[in-house]
Amino acid sequence: MKKLLIAGALAAISAQAADAEIRVGILHSTTGTMAISESTLRDVMLMMIEQQNAAGGLLGEQLVPVVVDGASDWPTFAERMRELLTVEEVDVVFCCWTSASRKAILPVVEELNGLVFYPVQYEGEESSYNVFYTGAAPNQQAIPAVDYFLEELGVEVFALLGTDYVYPRTTNRILEAYLLDAGIPQENIFVNYTPFGHSDWSSIVADVVALGEGGQQVGVISTINGDANVGFYTELAAQGVTADDIPVVAFSVGEEELAGLDTEPLVGHLAAWNYFMSADTPANEEFIAAWHEFTGDDTRVTNDPMEAHYIGFNMWVQAVEQAGTTDPDAVIAAMVGQTFPNLTGGMAEMLPNHHLTKPVLIGEITADGQFDIISQTDPVPGDAWTDYLPESSVLVSDWPGLGCGMYNTQTETCVQLESNY
């Protein structure tokens, strides 16, 4: 029934806007290992397009959604992006979850001068002229989560568990440097990577448990992505590991991923995001109500990347209205400085490095699959280049001021204009 409702909404939007000129690309995985996370992002984009059309459209035109499936396959993402920009001639693309898929589409987007909004936390170390990063950079998620482990939970041994691709590897390289600077010895940092869709977690969880045999407090920093999280949390419960024993803080587990799990054994484990569905604000209450009405299912949850798409989409609408056109260069220029309210309270602002200001939230998993927000900061400016890697600490991104996303402050030169793919 839910699939029929979404398909019906898509058909209705397309029929209403058959003659419109503003075409919105939606490129997410609706099949494969990442469908557990990305299908909802497609759906929330359809909801917002429907709402915008009901409010009169944009520049006097209705919006036409053009939905394609990245199929959890990174070369497919690149192919679908080229199709969207050349065949479908979309004006903007809301795209991707994994950094592997984002890296795959970057050469295509920069070659064809497209405009992309990327809604998921990532490893940083990038700033593209053609991309606006509405998810968290490491200083807006990973670093604050480690600080919470160090300062609030007294964690002494860190297990950095991740899926084997660029986001976990780069994030963990940053976190290793940060932990060493904080006085954690190298032998107290355990790093492990597993493939997408990994299912047999028995030996890895046993290894993590063994890290605490000397009596030190162990904590897990999880950059595990997609449906592999189901097996990981299931194995924790099977081995009797509770949050009191070994707390886990996840960067890619939100309400959507928990919806498929028995969360009772996971109570007390943590996630670090910039939004939780449990945020008690009028704006969030309205957003959730609209989501339930759109899907026809009041059990459908909301999550952090959905809020990132919500902010990015509304900023794009404002920038198009300001520019008076959907031309990518004009909209990109108008995007910097745009502000829009967060669903958790406060205001998001788009910075010259194409990253947002975002509050950092730590949430505890509750028995009903939601999160009890136990920590929330004021908005933190997203940092494209980390201060904790020597090669990155000298770099800044300032597109309107320097015309460069990778400017070396020591040599006072632009290292390169295209991204590191």
Image: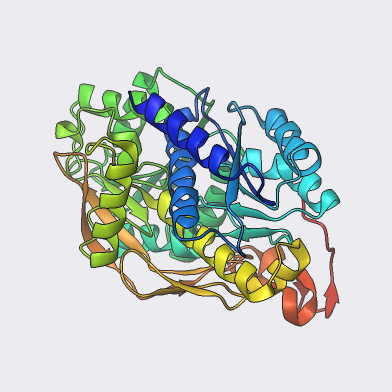
Q: Is residue 210 left or right of residue 419?
A: left
In terms of image quadrants, where is residue 284?
Answer: bottom left
Q: Give the color scheme: rainbow, by chain, secondary structure or one colour.
A: rainbow
Is residue 137 in view from this perspective?
A: no
Q: Is residue 284 left or right of residue 193?
A: left
In terms of image quadrants, where is residue 195?
Answer: top right
Point out residue 229 in the picture as x, y percentages from the top left corner: 38, 30
Point out residue 148 in the picture as x, y percentages from the top left corner: 31, 61
Pick the front one: 332 or 268: 332
Residue at horizontal 45%, vertical 57%? 310
Q: How many tags in the picture?
A: 0
Pick the front one: 166 or 324: 324
| Image height of 318 relative to 402, above or below | above
Q: Is residue 129 left or right of residue 373?
A: right
Residue at horizontal 77%, vertical 55%? 419
Residue at horizontal 32%, vertical 46%? 291
Residue at horizontal 34%, vertical 20%? 202
Q: Residue furthest top?
A: 200
Is residue 356 in view from this perspective?
A: yes
| Image height of 252 relative to 391, above or below | above
Point out residue 164 in the picture as x, y percentages from the top left corner: 57, 33
Q: Is residue 328 left or right of residue 271?
A: right
Point out residue 376 in the picture as x, y percentages from the top left corner: 29, 67
Quarter of the image with the N terminus is top left
